[in-house]
Amino acid sequence: MVEHLAALHALSIERNHLLRRELIRTAQVCNALGVEPLLLKGTLALLPGQPPETAARLMGDLDLMLPAAAVDIGQQALQDQLGYRPAYPDWHFAEHHHACPLIHPDHGVKLELHRAVTGRTLDAALPAEDLWRDSRRIDFEGTFVRVPTPTHRALHNALHTLLQDRGVELGKLALRQLLDLVQLRANRERAIDWPPIEARFTALGRSAALGGYLRVARDLFGQPLPDGARSSMAAAWLSGEFLLGIRHPPSGAAARLLLAGAAESPAEQAGHTLLVCDENSRAAAR
């Protein structure tokens, strides 16, 4: 078990070094266009001093948000200057919250340029303009990128995990996303303003979902609920369902192996293999 985890850790370090290099090159292209990309989700782990810890974060792709008017220009520049290609050239992404994912044919790094933070049904809960307004500029290896506030990071994590990825609907959580939130809170809890986050979920009629998510973080990682957080029977029931799905996943590893076999490129197969290893590690730990 120890050897397996050590091998997984080494693979993650190697992968994330490559992603970090490509993030710098992508930021250089964007800066030359007069744009400072705003980093989202796991991409933030590639910055120094930002949770979660880089080597422990298994990453599939790079997520960056550009001003909506700059996305098409950025897509073309990354293809012309860095050699990226559309991952799904026959699909239409004009109405999607991000442009067609780009993948590099040589090393397999995939990246998504976002127009918005989430899909349209959740756009009102976290408008892109809110992130841009409150984001902070960072000098990163001679380039300039922007990072969201801890409050917006926590809100985005919860919306993405629970609603966009249908965690509530399916009754299961991605442990990787849950750990991101746990590590963010461990490092930035005083900077997270929880009442506005709770208000956004209440407006969506999903306050129990947020409560259940935070209860799972408490039960699995010993992280206290935020000060003043409200609880309910519905939140308790949801947290029980989430925990059941985590402890007894419905053949999740087998499903990921099938995905790996159906991947469209060796690079995608490698990414799925890392996720399969992660799934197997969790199963062994249980």
Image (tube, rainbow, N blue to C red):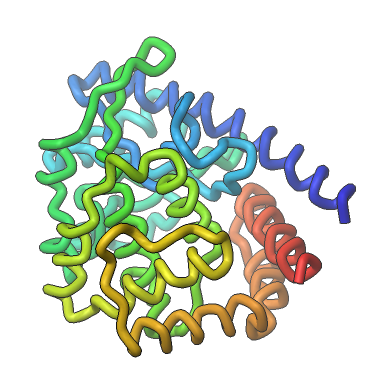
Q: Quadrant of residue 29?
A: top left
Q: Quadrant of residue 78?
A: top left
Taking 46 as reference, is 154 above or below it?
Answer: below
Task: Say if residue 85 shows up in the picture.
Answer: no
Q: Residue at x 34, y 89 (%)?
A: 233
Q: How many marks?
A: 0
Q: Residue at x 88, y 56 (%)?
A: 1
State the quadrant of the C terminus.
bottom right
Q: Residue at x 85, y 52 (%)?
A: 4
Task: Say if residue 219 shows up in the picture.
Answer: yes
- Compare residues 260 and 191 and report the one nearer the observer: 191
Taking 9 as reference, is 273 above or below it?
Answer: below
Taking 260 as reference, is 129 above or below it?
Answer: above
* Residue 81 pos. (x, y %): 39, 23
Q: Is residue 213 left or right of residue 191?
A: right
* Residue 254 pos. (x, y %): 72, 77
* Residue 201 pos. (x, y %): 20, 70
* Residue 24 pos. (x, y %): 44, 22
Q: Is residue 282 left or right of residue 45?
A: right
- Compare residues 11 and 152 and report the one nearer the observer: 152
Residue reaching furthest to the front: 228
Residue reaching furthest to the top: 142
Q: Residue at x 35, y 45 (%)?
A: 189
